[in-house]
Image (cartoon, coloured by chain):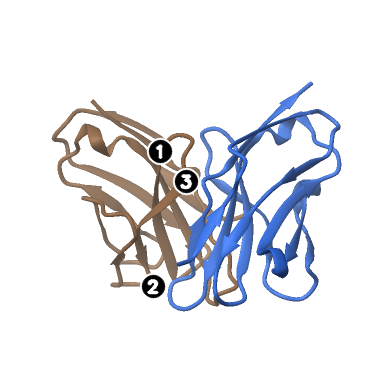
């Protein structure tokens, strides 16, 4: 069965520090992979997506993610975190066929210390 | 930036009332979705639509119903609200093609007293 695991429920980093949020997926075929960010009281905003090609993808707000097929991972990174990055981050895998189904992980809540 | 709008943003209402949550998108997307999200939790798909006059139930059973009479409009209705319906409801849409991401509205936070 398809699934997405985000092992870290909460992460706290200092402003200016680097960040890596982990995401592991289970899916039989080549996955479509997404990272979304959700600020309090808001909907989800797409940060970046991977479909094929270069395994290192660049997104908005200085984020990037690397697809590693051998590890079934799609980790999100940012070299220097800003206080405004505090939010909930969701990894999702797109299931091909039909209605563009997304399977979401449980999310990682990021706190940023000044 | 995606153009998908949800109203109301917040709703506090008593048990037994009929509620309609509105969702509209201006991108001409055929596919639309409703998710339910409890605070700090993952999203669960409750309804989706391939296009006009198409509606399907999602992975999470829900007492709500949806309709799709126009491409841009995908309202969700609760005939008789209960406290167990208290949650955040997120609407999304996507274009054609499996590689098209879903674009989300800002959600409706619903509280049933």
Query: Is tag 3's residue or tag 2's residue first in the polypeptide sequence?
Result: 3
The residue identified by callout 2 is: B50
The residue identified by callout 1 is: B38
Seen in the picture, residue A100 relative to B16 is either above or below; the reply is: below
* Tags 3 and 2 both on a single chain: yes
Mark 1 belongs to chain: B
Q: Are marks 3 and 2 in contact (CB under 8 Å)?
A: no
Q: Which chain appears blue? A: A
Quarter placement of the N terminus of chain B: bottom right
Q: Are marks 1 and 2 in contact (CB under 8 Å)?
A: no
The answer to which quarter of the image holds residue B3 is: bottom right
- Residue A39, how many percent across, how many down? 59, 36
Rendered colour, chain B: brown
Residue at the image point whose x is 58% and y is 69% from the top: B100
Mark 3 belongs to chain: B
The residue identified by callout 3 is: B42
Query: Is tag 1's residue or tag 2's residue first in the polypeptide sequence?
Result: 1
């Amino acid at each position: 069965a398809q699934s997405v695991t985000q092992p870290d429920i909460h992460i706290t980093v200092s402003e200016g520090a680097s960040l890596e949020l982990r995401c592991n997926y289970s899916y039989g075929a080549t996955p479509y992979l997404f990272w979304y960010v959700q600020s309090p009281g808001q909907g989800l905003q797409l940060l970046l997506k991977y479909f094929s090609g270069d395994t290192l993808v660049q997104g908005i707000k200085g984020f990037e993610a690397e697809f590693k097929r051998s590890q079934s991972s799609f980790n999100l990174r940012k070299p220097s975190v800003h206080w405004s990055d505090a939010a909930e981050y969701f990894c999702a895998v797109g299931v091909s066929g039909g209605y563009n189904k997304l399977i979401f992980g449980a999310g990682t809540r990021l706190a940023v210390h000044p | 930036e995606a153009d998908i709008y949800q109203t109301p943003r917040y709703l506090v209402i008593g048990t037994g009332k009929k509620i309609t949550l509105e969702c509209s998108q201006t991108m001409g997307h055929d596919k639309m979705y409703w998710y339910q999200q409890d605070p700090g939790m993952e999203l669960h798909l409750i309804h989706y639509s391939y296009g006009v006059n198409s509606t399907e139930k999602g992975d999470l059973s829900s007492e709500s119903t949806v309709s799709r009479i126009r491409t841009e409009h995908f309202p969700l209705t609760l005939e008789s609200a209960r406290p167990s319906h208290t949650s955040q409801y997120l609407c999304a849409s996507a274009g054609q093609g499996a590689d098209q991401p879903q674009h989300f509205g800002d959600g409706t936070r619903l509280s049933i007293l």
